[in-house]
């Protein structure tokens, strides 16, 4: 399952406009510490053994044969299969923000918290009158906030993900986006992210952990979070069935049913 970033991926992520070096570090006072601690409690379930770093390999399982791997890439969704039992990622949908030889990075789009973005970023006055919730983007870097925004003109200090959707860690970009929101412009804030080492995501896709599909801005910004995974797994479960051998019914019966 997605793991703590291995060193090569950490370097790659820090070189990106939305990477860890540019993400907003929210550990700057006690009030924010309490707010973000609530997020950590939400995602405090332990990672499976497959998610832990192996010093010899940097955490990546053996690479799967290329012919068996469905195509992943920036701007695509990873839809957790019904057999993915890791509680950190069961019944999640991940938007891939980067997919490179050094690894991959994404954010979970369907796990909102009860914490307001304004509570985590009290110095951003444009947020004071807004009730937007912060989403738990993954178990890595929960003290860092990344933003995914939909605007018609590409902002500076932002990375194009797909269509008119961009990722950034710049508060200036977010301030401007919020101040000028109109029509179908939207933004989401994510505390934490999901990360994979070299070859790790391809291997997980090959064994049936994830279904890869094109991302949909409406699902990222407008759809109720509780409806995203059920809708996509129902729509694309046939794709997974054709690619993988179905799990026995007695195993499926043990999987969690909650979102």
Image: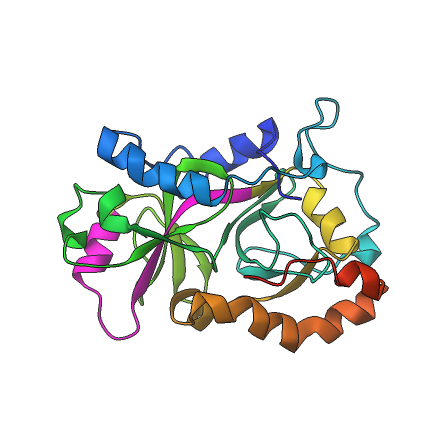
The quarter of the displayed image where residue 52 is located: top right
Quadrant in the picture for the N terminus: top right
The quarter of the displayed image where residue 94 is located: bottom right
Quadrant in the picture for the C terminus: bottom right
Vertical placement of residue 154 versus 191, above or below: below
Picture residue at 28% right of the left edge, 58% below the top: 132
Q: 171 or 231, which lies in front?
A: 231
Q: Please name the colour scheme applied to the rendered image.
A: rainbow
Vertical placement of residue 88 versus 219, above or below: above
Q: Was residue 175 drawn as part of the magenta stretch in this picture?
A: yes
Percent position (x, y) of residue 121?
Answer: 23, 43
Picture residue at 37% right of the left edge, 41% below the top: 38
Q: What residue range appears in magenta? A: 173-194
Percent position (x, y) of residue 235?
Answer: 64, 77
Percent position (x, y) of residue 113?
Answer: 38, 52
Q: 128 or 171, which lies in front?
A: 128
């Amino acid at each position: 399952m997605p793991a703590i970033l291995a060193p090569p991926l950490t370097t790659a992520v820090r070189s990106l406009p939305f990477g860890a070096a540019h993400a907003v570090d929210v550990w700057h006072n006690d009030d924010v510490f309490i707010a973000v601690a609530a997020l950590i409690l939400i995602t405090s379930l332990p990672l499976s053994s497959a998610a832990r770093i192996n010093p010899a390999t940097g955490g990546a399982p053996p690479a799967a044969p290329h012919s068996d791997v469905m195509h992943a890439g920036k701007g695509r969704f990873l839809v957790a299969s019904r057999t993915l039992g890791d509680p950190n990622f069961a019944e999640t949908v991940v938007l891939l923000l980067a997919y490179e030889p050094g690894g991959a990075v994404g954010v979970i789009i369907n796990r909102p918290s009860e914490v307001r973005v304004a509570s985590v970023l009290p110095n951003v006055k444009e947020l004071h009158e807004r009730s937007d919730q912060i989403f738990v983007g993954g178990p890595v870097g929960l003290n860092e906030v990344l933003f995914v925004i939909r605007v018609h003109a590409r902002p500076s200090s932002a990375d194009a993900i797909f269509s008119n959707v961009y990722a950034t860690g710049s508060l200036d970009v977010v301030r401007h986006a919020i101040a000028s929101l109109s029509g179908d412009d939207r933004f989401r804030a994510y505390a934490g992210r999901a990360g994979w080492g070299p070859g790790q995501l391809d291997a997980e896709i090959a064994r049936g952990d994830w279904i890869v599909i094109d991302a949909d801005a409406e699902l990222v910004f407008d759809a109720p979070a509780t409806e995203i995974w059920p809708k996509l797994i129902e729509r694309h479960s046939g794709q997974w069935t054709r690619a993988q051998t179905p799990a026995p019914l007695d195993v499926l019966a043990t999987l969690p049913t909650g979102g």
